[in-house]
Image (tube, rainbow, N blue to C red):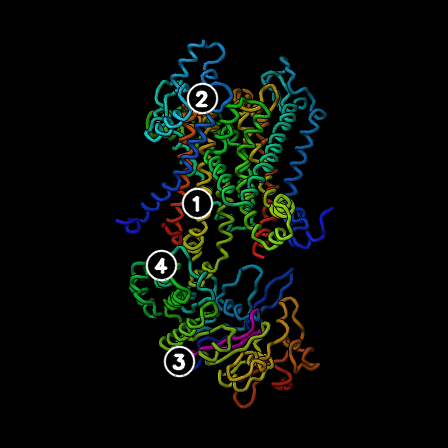
Amino acid sequence: MTFRQLAARNPTTFFIARRLLFSIPTILAVLTVIFFAMRTLPGDPAYAILGDIATAEAIEALRERLGLNLPVSQQYLDFLLGIFQGDFGTSLVFGRPVLGEILRVLPFTLELTFASIIIGSAVGIPLGVLSALYRNRLLDYITRVVSLIGFSIPVFFTAILLILAFAVHFRWFPVISSGNSAGFSGRINELVLPALTGALSLMAMMTRATRSSMLEVLGEDYVRTARAKGAPRTIIVIRHALRNALIPVVTIIGLYFALIIGNSVLIETVFTRPGLGSLIIGSLDNRDYPMVQGLLVIYALIIVVVNLATDLSYSVIDPRVKRS
Amino acid sequence: MADPDTAPAPLLRVEGLTTEFRLGGEWHSAIRNLSFSVDRNETLAIVGESGCGKSITVMSLMRLLPEHGCRLTADQVNLNGQDLMGLSEDEMRSLRGNRMAMIFQEPMTALNPVLTIGLQIAEPLMFHRGMTLAEARPAVIELLDQVGIPSAAKRVDDYPHEFSGGMRQRVVIAMALACDPDLLLADEPTTALDVTIQAQVLALLADLKAAKGMGMILITHSLGVVAAVADRVAVMYAGDMVETAGVEELFANPVHPYTEALIRSIPRPDRDIEAVVPITGTVPSIDRMPVGCRFAARCSYAEARCTESAPPLTPVGEGSSHVAACWVRAGGQTA
Amino acid sequence: MTRPVADEQLIPTSGSPVFRALVGAFNHNKLSWVGLGLFMALAILAIGAPVFAPFDPIDQSIMSRMKPPSAEHLFGTDQYGRDLFSRALYGARISLLVGVVSVLLGLVIGGSLGVIAGYFGRVTDTIIMRVMDVMLSFPTLIMGIIIVALLGPSLPNVIIAITATLVPKFARIARAPTIAIKERAYIEACHAMGYSDLRIMLLHIVPNILAEILVMASLWTANAIMIEAGFSFLGLGVRPPTPTWGGMIREGFEHIFQAPWMSLFPGICILLAVMSLNLLGDGLRDAVDPRLKRSKEG
C-alpha cells in the first residue's frame, strides 16, 4: 500500500503520524540541548550534589552512578537510547526511576490544567460574546476592566486572594490541596481553588480574544446572508458567528496550555499540591539532576503534543483546513 | 399569496423611500424619495455607478441596514398588499428569506465557510416552514438540482470552499429560492464571476423568475446585463432615481443626460473606440450633495436653473411609463 | 544627520514611523495615557525610593511587629517590624529594573538574531530559528526557573534567566517583517548602490520593524515583571533582605492568617505595574497594527 492510499483511507491518523514525524527533529534537538546544558553546568554535578563536606570517595562513587566517568559521546548515546526506551535515569532523591515518579504526579498537573482550561473557556467565551454584542455598553466596559485585571494579576496573588476569601473567610474549600483526599468529591473539592486560580488568566485572555474575533466576524458577509434568510438572532450569533470566531480562539487555548503548565509551578507551591511544578522545585532544591533532566523532557513532549492537538482541532473546527 | 381581487396592484409598490445616515452628528440622505414598482414575473433593473445608492435601496427594502446611525422613511413600501413600513423587526424577519429573498454580489464571502451548503440552503425552510434539517433535505437536493448543480445529492454535505465561484453563486440562488419568495432582490449577482459564468447565471435567474413567476429587482452597473435580462430599467444617480423606462425604450430613446452618458460609455464592437465617451468626474459624496440637480456638475447640458432646484420625474412623450428628471431634456418646466 | 539625501528618497516608509505610530496611539486610545501615567508614577516612586520612603526598608523593629496599616505605616509592618510601604517602594526598583533591563537585552539580542535570520535566510536562518524553536519548547516560567536555579539566585542571574526566555520571542517577531521588507524594491536599490549588509539592516530594515517590536516590548515588560515576582515568590529571585514584591508576598503568605496585609499590598503593586504596561501595550498595538497592515498591503 502506498503512502497516498494510506492517507486516503484514514486522513486523521495519517495527519497525526505525519505531524509526529515532523516533530522528531525538534524533539531530538531539544534532547540534545537538555543533555549538554545539564553537563555544562558550572562545577562537577557530583560535587554540587554532595556539597563541600563530601569525601573524595563518595564523589567518585556518585560520578560512577551517574555515568559521569564515561566519555561524553557514550553518555549522550546512552541518554538518547534510554529516553526512547522509557528509561529516564534514577532519581538521586527517591532512588527510584525518574519516569515513574513523574508519571505518579503528572495526573495532578494535567487535572489542574484541564480544569483551568474548561472553567476559563466556559466563562471567557460567553463573556467575550456578550461583550461584543453589547459593544461600548456598560456590560462591555465591566467585562473589559475585569479581563484587564485578570490578565495582569500574578497567579500566586490570585491564589492568595482566593484562599483568603474561600478557604479562610467562607471556609468552603481547603487551603491545602495535598492530593491525598479520598474519593472523587474530595479530589474535586481540593481542585476547585487551584483550578479557579489557573482559570482566571485564561478567562481574561479568552474574553478579549473572543470579543475581538466576534466583532470581526459579525461584520462578515455571511452574517448578513444569515440575516437576509430571516435567521433568529441566537442562530446568527451561535451558529453563524461564534463557530467562525472560535477558530483563532483555539490558538489561545494551545498557547495557554503551555502557560498554565508553567504557572502550575506557582499554583502547586501555593496550595502545597503535588504535580510537575512541585516536583521540579523540589528536584532543583535537592540538586536531583536526573529528575530535572527527565522533567525537562516531559515538558518538551507536552508542548509538542499540545501543538499537535491545536493543529488537529483546527481541522475539526474549520473544514477549509485540509488534513494532508 | 396575492388576493385575486386586487390582482391589478403590483407585487411591490414603493413610494417616497428615503434612507439617511448620520455622519458627524448630521443626517444625510443616501437615497432620496424613491418611488417605483415591480410586477409579478417582471424584472426591474436598477443601474448606476457605484456609490449611487443601488445597494442601499435593496438593503432598505430588506431592512438589513444597521439599527444605529441609519434612518428609514417612506410613504409606503407595499409587498403583496402588506405595508412593510409598520412592521416590527420580528415581523420583518418572518418575511426575509421567505416572501422576499436576496442574492449577494460576492459568492466567495456570502456563504458561511464552516457550515455545509446543505444546512445553509435548508435554513430558510427551517426558519419559516418549521422543518428540521432532515425533513428539509429532499427539498434542498431538489433546489440544488434546479439551480444546475451536478450530482446534487452528493454535494449537499460539502462545504463552500469545495465549490467554484459560479457554483457558489448557484448555491446562494438556491438558498434565496428555498421558500419560493414572491420578490427576489439580486445585488450585482454576476459582477464577481467570470464572463462565461456570468451569462449562465443570468440565464438561470431569468429561467427561474419565469418558472416561479417572481418579481425581481436586479442591481447592476452593467448595461449589458440590463439589456440581457431586464423588463424595465430604473437609472439611479447620487441617491435619486433620474429615469425609468421599459428596457427597449430606454436604449432607443435615453432622455436624461446621465442615462445617455452611461449608454455612450459602453464600448461596442460596431463602433470605434473613440466613440466611447467616459463620464468625467465622480458622484458627489453623501455629505456634500449640491442643492439642485445632483448631476449638474458633470452634465454637458447644464443650465443655470439646474443648480437652483432639483427637477421632478416627468413623463416623456406619449409612453406614460417613461419618466425622467431633467429640466432641460424632459421639459420639467411644467412642475 | 550625515545620511545622504538619496536614502530618504529610497525609503518611502522611513521618516520616523515609530514616532508617528506612538503619537497616533496616544491620540487614538486614552487608556494608553492612563497606562503611561501610571507607569511613570511607579518609575518615579521607584527611583526616588530613598526620598519617599519614611523608613529604612531593612531596619527591623521588634516593637512594631505585624502592625496593620495605619497613618504611620501605610501598608503595615511585617514579622520583623519593617515598614512595608518603604519595602514596597524599594521593591519597585527591583521589579522595574529587572523588567526594563531584561526586555532591553532580549530586544537587542533576540531582535538582532531575528533580523539576521530573516535578512540572510538559508542556513543562517535555519540554524538560528531551530535554536529559538528549541528554547520555545519549554514553558517560559519553567525555563526561567531552571536557569536561575542552576546559576544561583542573584539580581544578574534573574535578569539573565528572563532575558533568555525573551530572546526567542523577540527573534520570532523581528524575523517575519524582516523577510517581508527584504523583498521590497528599495532594499534591492540599496544593494545596487553597494551598501553593506550591516548598513541596510541598521538603517533600512530596523526602523521599519521597530514599531511592531516596541509594542511587544511593552507587553513583555509586563510579563517580565510577573516572572521576576514569580521567581522571588518561589525564593529563586534576588536574595533577602533586599525587598522584592514577590518576596514580600512569599513572607506574607507564611503569615496569611495573622497579617493578610503583608501579601495584599505588594500584590496590588504588581497588579498596578503589570496593568499599566498592558494598557500601554494594548493602546500601542491598536494604533500600530492597522498602520502596519496598511503599509504591508500598500
Q: Nearer the viewer, residue A281 or B178?
A: A281
The reply to whether residue A150 is in sight is no
Check residue A282 in the rendering and tell me which mark sits there, or answer none.
2
Q: How dense is the environment of label 4, judged by Cα within 10 Å: few (below 14), some, or many (20 and up)? A: many
Q: Main secondary structure of the magenta part?
A: strand
Residue B270 lies, with reference to residue B31, above or below; the image says below
Q: Is residue A247 magenta?
A: no
Question: For the residues marked 2 and 4, what is the alpha-carbon distance in whole angstroms?
Answer: 56 Å
Contact check, label 1 and label 2, Cβ < 8 Å? no
Which element carries disc 1, helix, strand or loop?
helix
Q: Are marks 3 and 1 on the same chain?
A: no
Label at residue B119: 4
Please name whichever residue, C197 or A155, is drawn nearer the observer in this view of the structure. Answer: C197
Marker disc for residue A250 = 1
**Residue at 61% across, 47% down:** C205
Q: Is residue C146 visible?
A: yes
Q: Amino acid under label 1?
A: Val
Q: Which residue is mark 3?
A: B5
Q: Amino acid at mark 4?
A: Leu
Q: Are marks 4 and 3 on the same chain?
A: yes
| Residue A13, quarter of the rendered image | top left
Q: Nearer the viewer, mark 1 or mark 2?
A: 2
Quadrant position of the C terminus of chain B in the picture: bottom right
Inter-mark Cα distance, 1 to 4: 24 Å
Q: Earlier in the sequence, mark 1 or mark 2?
A: 1
First in sequence, mark 4 or 3: give its number.
3
Quick one: C208 or C54, which is closer to the camera? C208
